Image (cartoon, rainbow, N blue to C red):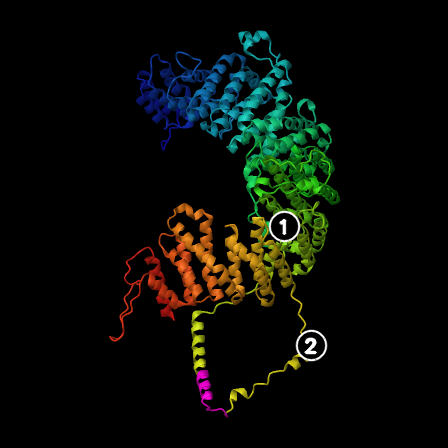
Amino acid sequence: MAEHQIEDPKIAFAYLRPSCVLLTKEPTSANVEALSANLRGISDGALQQLQDYVLFPLRFVLKTPGSKREGFIQAVMETMTYVLENTCVQSWDSLRDLFSELCLCLCSPKDPGKPAMSSEELKLAVLRCLDTLLHSAYGDIVFKLYEPSMLPGLGAAVSLLLALAEHEKARGVQLASLKCLLSLFLQCNCKEEHIKPGQNERYLLGRALATFLPGISRALSEVISGDIRQGHAVTMKAMRVWYKAVGLVMADEQLQKTDNDRAAGDLGKDEELVVKRTPSWRKATSQRLAIVLQKIISCTSSHPHWRIRLELVNLSHLLLSQCSQSVGECVGPLLEALVGAINDEEPEVKSRCNAALNEIAQKGQTNGRQDFTDVLSENLHSLASSLPRLMRTSDDQRKLFVLNVFLGYLKILGPKVDAVLRSSVHLERISKALMQVMELDVTDVKIIEERTLKSSTDLGPDVHQVPSQRKYFLYFTDERIFSALGKICRMLGYYGNLYLLVDRFMELYKESSVYRKQAALVLNEVIVGAAGIGVETDNSRIDSSGINQSRTNQEDLKSSIMSIIEEYISLSNWHLPTVSEALEGKLEATTSLVPNYPERNGLQLLPASKTPTLHQLNSNIWQICIQLEGIGGFALALGTDFRLLLMTSLYPVLEKAGDESLLVSQAAFNAMCDLCKACDYSSPKELVIKNADYLLNDVSLNLGRPSIHPHAPRVLAVMFTHSDASLLPLVADVVQDVLTALDLSYDQRTPQFCSVLHLLMKALVRWFPATMGHQKPSSKDTQNKECVNLRQFLLDYKKQKELAEGIGVEEEDPNELDVPPPASASDEDMEGPAEKKELPLHIQIAKDVMERCIHLLSDPNLRTRLKVLDILELCVCVLCEREDELLPMVHRCWPALLHRLTSDDPLAVPRAFKVLCVLGQSCGDFLRKRVSKEVLPRLTSSLMKQAEISARSGPAYTHTLAYKLQLAVLQGLGPLCVSLDLMEADLDRVCEACLLYLSCRQPIKLQEACLSVFRSLMDLDADMCWFTLNELFCPVTYEPPHPQLLPVTLSGSDKPRDQFTDNVLRLLQEFESLNAER
């Protein structure tokens, strides 16, 4: 823009006249640009007076016949746009002519009904000029565009703009055409000033647009539902044009008028184009709009861009607030779209939706003056009816939207949900819909495969809550959908009648095993919602009484929870088979829990003779997990009041914490953590200890009724895991009951009792840590001790020799003066027999358990033998500080243990050898002769035989039982020799067997284990080890220190490098460094 603009119109005219005349004579782009440059030097006031003069040459060059270059037309459009931006069109004729000429620039010359095949830049220039023209219309002359006489021209313009929006690929052209439509409908929302139409003008505009409403709806619905790649701005603008147009045409205030206010003769032929908006037309149009609306909502309700969802809220709000009576068929879908956004993840969408619903709710009237609550309840019923179908056929985004709509209805109804649920039809529809939608997928084989190799019973007593297993459903996979379903159930519990809901879903729970898991899921969430946990409410809508506190009386909540827990932990719903016969080797006789108990309500108890299928086992596992989650949730809902229910619920939870299914045990442990949180216990350990008295009472009673309560040992096992030594005095009697029960029925229940005893002994080891005896002193200490003993030996030898020769017989030994005389036997007898001290409780229990292990070591079941060996190892660890108690027990168990070591399954031998190593650390000399005579010969012989096989085997050998046995023996053999202090022939035997494993052809781990054996043997007899290794390979030649001494020649001196050389050299180097340290 020029620095000094011309203000005087006369001077401006003289300044512009040459450019205008030249352009008229020579229509070129250069002349257009020259005129445009000159226009920048004219002020707006002067340009306003010269508007028609300046526009004339520009319009003239457009009308001249002949083809024109696009660049020229574009320059003309840009110049016209500048003029219109800075002036006002005050003449109707000028507005009409310019409007028509600009529309012609968009038309195809051969087919005026279609857009021209011009460049994107030209179309943008024409559309911008057209938009500027509509904005520059002064006063009310723009309203003449909507008179019946202008309907043909207006229709042509609307058709062109819609065609550009629908078919143009360039996003900029689409947006510009849609903006022109908004300006043409007087609904533009740009920053410029706009003429606000009054009531009469809105009526005139609405009547004109009614003629084009079908075309507008069709074209814009295609744009809205188009490819998502067109961008959110195009979709959003198309939605705005559509609902603004519909809002003008179908406004309630307009349709209350009549369209017969003009005489037919005044209109002439244009009368045929005017739509008379009669009641019949309104109804038919409303029905057609409902179809278009459904298409728009389906494409935009779950759109990934939040601005599209926000525009849908604006659409619904405008039509419901301005056209609710005129578009009665659309009220349901509009309300559904609005309600669906109430739980939108975008805060702006959510807040705008809340404000819109507030306004509509306060208005209180919708279609046919029907009550707002009635419309919501009808929509809720309709949605509940179609929910199962929608969940089966829609994609996850659509499913999530539908559930958000459902949740939105409940939020809007608020406390009135109770009134809706009192309708049996509504309650039936909603409950059955939830049952079908929440059906679990129980076909995954991993559910039954997940076993408790490290279950909650093996965890420490104070571990944190573990993440719960993800649930898989038949009809959806998105976690957000499950979250939305949980919110719906909690909302029902928060606003609905708790007794009514509990009775209904308990009825479904008992009705069929098909509904049982879903009903339990819903009940769990309903109770949590009734307590006000996890419930989102909007207090500003309908009734503001629903604050985020429990609306349910605490006593009612407690009563409902008690009835649900009672049903959950009943024998028929709690003791379900979770382990298959194929995995367990023996199916637990779960159905024998209730002898002659009739199957009621389709319970999942199976005949004792029928093996449950994978599907049934998975279903049982999930049912128990859901019920455990429910108990944890109930505890959180009641808080400290749940302490009164611990007597009935804690025992079953601990029972499942010891279950062999990983999912069940984890769910039970999480329930324990929830109980701790609710009842103010710091950890599961404190929970168990504080309630140990009545838990142990139940365990003691149930141990005597194994046919009805076979899982009492599990409870005891879990208690051992989650407690400390303070539990031992309480549990001592129950442990004796377990041992007695094991004695009486070990054939049937040995595995269970062994698991309990194993956990008991692990607990004792943890509670009473002991130091293993007979630790071998270090080699340096041994050397010093040997030096002292040698000196004493020489002194004693000298003294004895002198005494033999009669020297110093008469002398008194000063060291013997203070030695008191030995007490006579009669003195000892006078004191009476020594009373045997009472053993500590944990020592006595360990002895009793070890007593049973002696008998069970020969059990025919391999799994039992392995478990007993583990228990035996723990017993030795507890008794190791009491040799007078341990050694007799070791003597008694030795024959059975020897049999396990020498003649048992390859799986049991490594475990038995591990027990032997622990015994060696604890008993030491007591076992030396037995091991030397009965164990070492067989072990070394086996090692030598297997060495040849392992040396020539491939990588697959490391997965065999023989390899694992070799590795276990070699890893434990060195420490065993040290702890037993083996000497001479035994060490020679071990060395001979282990030398073969120094070969580089052996598997790496076997070589490393063999090296560890020799390192241990160096502590026992370093000279023997050194000599043995040098016999195999001697790396150096030893020269005599004096010529008269004969040279020392070892058999390994002349040997070349072979398969043993590397490992022998490695050991000899370690030996030299060890000597250097000494």
The disc labelled 2 sits on which kind of residue? Answer: Gly
Q: The N terminus is located in which quarter?
A: top left
Looking at this rendering, what residue extends furthest in the bottom direction?
810
Residue that numbered label 1 is attached to: 750
Give the quadrant of residue 585. Answer: top right
User: Which x, y percent locates residue 167?
Assistant: 44, 20
Left of 160 or right of it: where is 397?
A: right
Q: Give the numbered dot on residue 839.
A: none
* Front-most of residues 139 and 567: 567
Callout 1: SS: helix
Q: Which residues are magenta?
A: 795-810
Callout 2: SS: loop
Confirm or deny contact between disc 2 and disc 1 (CB under 8 A): no
Q: Give the numbered dot on residue 832.
A: 2
* Front-most of residues 179 and 736: 736
Can residue 821 be seen here? The reply is: yes
